[in-house]
Image (tube, coloured by chain):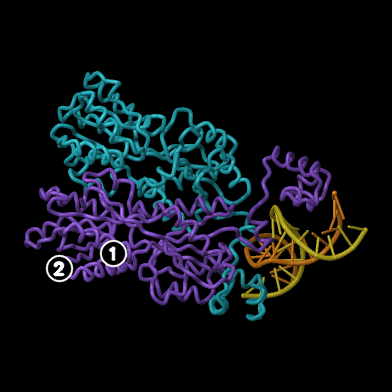
Chain colours: A purple, B cyan, C orange, D yellow
DNA sequence: ATGAAAGCGCTAACAT
DNA sequence: ATGTTAGCGCTTTCAT
């Protein structure tokens, strides 16, 4: 910048003002300086400017994934894309991290070291308590996940309870009585979907069979074995509600391999509405979450958190997309 | 830091040294200071430190995706995950951006403004020339994509030519003669896969039927129509090689819907080996790319580029995974 | 409308 | 082994 100033025959103050578009500098000078800067491929050093301004213009995104698996769920990528666009549109930057095992302090560190203005955390896993602690200590953040009781951090999430309820009620309406549930209920979102499932069954006066609950972990490779075990035990079921489309599609594959007609003998409903859901055969009935809104909502809550506004949650509406797998 | 110094009764230099683990400071003092810092939740301001050191310790990742679609391809997320881990393991940060339309200068800007030490670019699209220009002007970078003739930027990519060749040869060995190709050949990687396809056909003395080439765009929703058009025209084909698993799975869905037996009447091979490929029915034969290595390779080449080492490429080996869809 | 000067928080000579 | 000092590149009072 000092070079530009010399070449333009002005002080660095003037250059700084011109480059940031201050109206104090007449347009003529401003243009001359801007032009000079461009011709020299000069850009203001963002780090230095931020240091001076005491603002990083950066938000940290922390991926809490139980394994490499989860990050490969198309759904996570959807949220990430929506976040990236939102943040970029605001002219801010996005620092991406995957939380390492037992390194929870990384999150606090990113904020306290002034790297980021706040955090967007994707997923909760078992870190609910830790997140609460961070929030109480004033770390600005917004979390994608389930609306848990007693959370003191702002949450954005789909309406998981309703999603589970809609899916299950739909299956009941189709005449299913023995509806299996596939989902890792230690995962808060899946837990709520399970509650919705239970609620729909109760409402219809159907007694839930605990043997039809499968604590399947996302991405687990043993779907096939499980289904075969069920069939071999003559554990009969006429429908499956799975907590992710990836799981649902895998289940359909396993069932078809065994020659079980879908939806003829077993109806299937998934969750997420990933791209492939409408392309597999049979096309998959599923619960859609509004991903595009997720990024904006998370950033909005994060800003409120940074501004010290009172905490609130955003529940994004959830929609049942009926396709062939449950007809 | 000045507070810590005062409280510890030493100068800021000592605190700085202690906190960065300098061996100049005796362990006793070092521990005392570290402890004090922790108790106060103090962290070194990374921005200020970087400004002083003249090094950002940050790499920029630029996603070049033709649409929202592409970023939802599980494969991209895989690379991103592998990159994140690699960068984090090195104690560096990762700044994520999605390149906006007509904002190619963003890339240069990230480096020239000192935000990042260099760029990892995912995808090439039609930006080959622009990337060349950047590289020639000394912007440090590494690109995931196809090994194009005359690239002056370092490239990491799968062996697309061989991948296309392996897939096609496999189908030929299974007795297929009329093998369709699905892929957007304006996309450099798909272009190479198409070359491999052509090469395998030639080698087997099979004449390629141009009507069997489908310039399908990743994520396009009209797969079903296309397939139906083919079947209705009695455009006969006994195999399909698709440039992504998402496409291949969609195609299988469309074919099954029409009652076409796979692999009985039509054999199918995909590309990427996404998680679902081994779970759909029939399980999908595909070409696997070693994603885990991608992140490390990209970062390695980027470092070489930063160090001013001569440009080189890394071609990651490609492997045919034979499953039921082509038996 | 512009410049001089201070200082954001830190590190690294240099000095002792 | 520790302190003093300068300065990374910028923005912003304050003064003119």
**Relative horizontal placement of residue B276, taking residue A256 as reference (left or right):** right
Query: Is B310 drawn above or below residue A57 in the view shown?
Result: above
Residue at the (23%, 23%) spot, across then down? B233
Q: Secondary structure at mark 1?
A: helix
Q: Label 1: which residue?
A: A165
Mark seen at residue A155: none
Q: Position of residue A213 (x, y in %)?
A: 19, 66
Residue at the (69%, 61%) spot, across then down? A52
Give whichever of B112, A294 is nearer the camera.
A294
Query: Is B7 drawn above or below residue B322 in the view shown?
Result: below
Badge 2: chain ID: A
Q: Secondary structure at mark 2?
A: helix
Query: Is A61 drawn above or below residue A25 in the view shown?
Result: below
Dot 2 or dot 1: first in sequence order is 1
2 or 1: mark nearer the eye? 1
Q: Position of residue A251 (x, y in %)?
A: 20, 53
Query: Is B209 drawn above or below residue A117 in the view shown?
Result: above
Residue at the (58%, 62%) spot, across then down? B46
Badge 1 crowding class, 10 Å Cα cut-off, few under 14, some 14 to 19, many 20 or more, is many
Quadrant in the rendering for residue B22? bottom right
Q: Label 2: which residue?
A: A211
Quadrant in the rendering for residue A236? bottom left
**Relative horizontal placement of residue B126, taking residue B169 as reference (left or right):** right
Separation of residues labelled 2 and 1 (CA atoms): 19 Å
Q: Position of residue A6 (x, y in %)?
A: 80, 45
Badge 2 crowding class, 10 Å Cα cut-off, few under 14, some 14 to 19, many 20 or more, is few
Residue A139 visible: yes
Badge 1: chain ID: A
């Amino acid at each position: 910048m000092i070079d530009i100033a010399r070449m333009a025959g002005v002080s660095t103050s003037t250059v700084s003002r011109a480059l940031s578009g201050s109206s104090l500098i007449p347009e003529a000078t401003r243009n001359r300086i801007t032009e000079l800067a461009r011709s020299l491929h000069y850009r203001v050093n963002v780090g230095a400017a931020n240091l001076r301004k005491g603002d990083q213009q950066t938000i940290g995104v922390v991926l809490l994934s139980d394994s490499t698996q989860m990050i490969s769920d198309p759904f996570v990528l959807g949220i990430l894309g929506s976040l990236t666009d939102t943040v970029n549109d605001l002219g801010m930057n996005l620092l991406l991290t995957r939380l390492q095992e037992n390194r929870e302090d990384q999150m606090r560190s990113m904020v306290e070291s002034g790297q980021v203005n706040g955090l967007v955390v994707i997923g909760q896993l078992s870190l609910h308590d830790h997140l609460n602690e961070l929030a109480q200590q004033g770390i600005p953040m917004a979390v994608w996940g389930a609306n848990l009781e007693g959370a003191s951090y702002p949450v954005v999430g789909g309406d998981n309870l309703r999603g589970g309820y809609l899916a299950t009620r739909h299956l009941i309406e189709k005449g299913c009585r023995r509806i299996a549930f596939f989902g890792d209920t230690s995962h808060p979102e899946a837990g709520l979907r399970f509650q919705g499932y239970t609620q729909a069954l109760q409402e219809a006066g159907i007694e839930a069979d605990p043997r039809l609950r499968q604590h399947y972990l996302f991405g687990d490779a043993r779907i096939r074995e499980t289904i075969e075990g069920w069939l071999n035990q003559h554990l009969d079921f006429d429908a499956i509600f799975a907590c992710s489309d990836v799981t649902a599609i895998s289940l359909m594959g396993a069932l078809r391999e065994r020659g079980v007609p879908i939806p003829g003998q077993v109806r299937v409903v998934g969750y997420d509405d990933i791209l492939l859901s409408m392309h597999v055969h049979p096309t998959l009935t599923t619960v859609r979450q509004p991903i595009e809104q997720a990024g904006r909502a998370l950033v909005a809550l994060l800003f409120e958190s940074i501004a010290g506004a009172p905490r609130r949650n955003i529940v994004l509406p959830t929609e049942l997309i009926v396709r062939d797998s449950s007809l």
